[in-house]
Amino acid sequence: MRNIKDYDLEDLKKELIEMGEKPFRAEQIFKWIYQEKVKDFDDMTNISLELRKKLKENYTMCNYNILKKQESKDGTIKYLFDVLDGNAIETVLMSYHHGYSICVSSQIGCKMGCKFCASTGINFVRSLSSGEIVEQILAVEQDTGVRISNVVFMGIGEPLDNYDNVVNAIRIINNPKGLNIGARHISVSTSGLVPKIYKLAEENIQCTLSISLHATNNEKRSSMMPVNDAYPVEELIQACKDYIAKTNRRISFEYALAKDNNDNLNDAKELVKLLKGMICHVNLIPINKIENGAYTKSSNDNIMKFRDYLNDHGIVATIRRELGSDIDAACGQLRRKNLKD
Ligand code: SAH
């Protein structure tokens, strides 16, 4: 049986037509799921009993069970969800002055192998379906009663390694009859899968693209991120320039500062050279030390100097607020967990 949340509205209409139903039924079902947030076909009270029965025979609702919920002192909540096949994923809800933001996972495990990330070193299991991605938002909204206004694909996994499902999930999240979250409030973060960046530029989606850059030259970047061997810095930057030209959207570059590794003013100088002339923003992240990790956080003083150097040289840079670090919910701390551990 397919998960009904795997379908964008247009595909759900096709499904209903195949069942001999009118396409407007798909809109009604969509509204029940994404606006009324019901968990059961039987709660869809303007759908006939007969159609509800057919729906139940053909589709699941894929409601997640919460295995664990941890709340940080700063209000950040980390969820461990049972994805209903013996696996579990983590999702984080953050509260900002402008609203609630959710950090979703796109895969169970990750293949990228970034040296500083907690999702590395655990076996990759599989990609999540669109419905399994979207369900993270629904489950958190159902649990807390809050309305989420921002979605970032920065949880476990490489979103562009699960391209079709992530793009389809974005369409469901963005659809005014779906979760109705504006595309500009949706960010996709990638370690730099160059061919997929070119592909994403061709989709008609106005989402924000974040690039996990972290270093400015190939030697350093490859030592932190093996993906750089396949797609070196110059190819990555060229793909970003193409993305900006095609979409007219600003790119956000993530740069996690690790002590004595990529955090001195020479690195800042190289970064200015690399990004000069691009419509972009640099997000500086104080690197979070992971278990047995080789990298440690730069000093606050260094981080501020780095930011000031970029800003003084025409690159807009901000330091990311650290949320949820006391519950291992900050950047790069999420990991796939087995139900058993
Ligand atoms: N695979 C995607 C999305 C997941 S990681 C990507 O690589 O972009 C989300 C962000 O957290 C990325 O920018 C990643 O580089 C960063 N990150 C990973 N581990 C980190 C750590 N230990 N400290 C700070 N940021 C980290």
Image: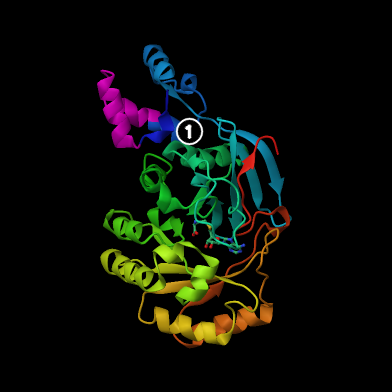
Q: Is residue 145 left or right of residue 316?
A: right
Q: Note whether residue 215 is visible.
A: no
Instruction: Kindly indicate the quadrant of the structure image that contains residue 305.
Output: bottom right
Name the residue nearer the viewer: 215 or 164: 215
Q: Note whether residue 208 is visible.
A: yes
The part of the chain drawn in magenta is 8-29
| Residue at screen point 59% across, 79% down | 263
Q: Main secondary structure of the magenta part?
A: helix
Residue 289 location, x and y as percent? Answer: 68, 64
Does residue 26 show up magenta in the picture?
Answer: yes
Residue that label 1 marks: 36
Dot 1: what SS?
Answer: loop
Q: Is residue 130 left or right of residue 318?
A: left
Name which residue type carries label 1: Glu
Residue 336 location, x and y as percent? Answer: 60, 45
The quadrant where ligand 1 appears is bottom right
Is residue 263 placed above or below 22 in the rendered structure?
below
Residue 230 location, x and y as percent? Answer: 40, 63
Name the residue nearer the viewer: 197 or 142: 197
Q: Identify the image quadrant of the C terminus.
A: top right
Q: Identify the image quadrant of the N terminus.
A: top left
| Residue at screen point 26% across, 22% down | 18
Local crowd size for mark 1, using a 10 Å CA cut-off: few (<14), some (14–19), many (≥20):
few
| Residue at screen point 36% across, 43% down | 168
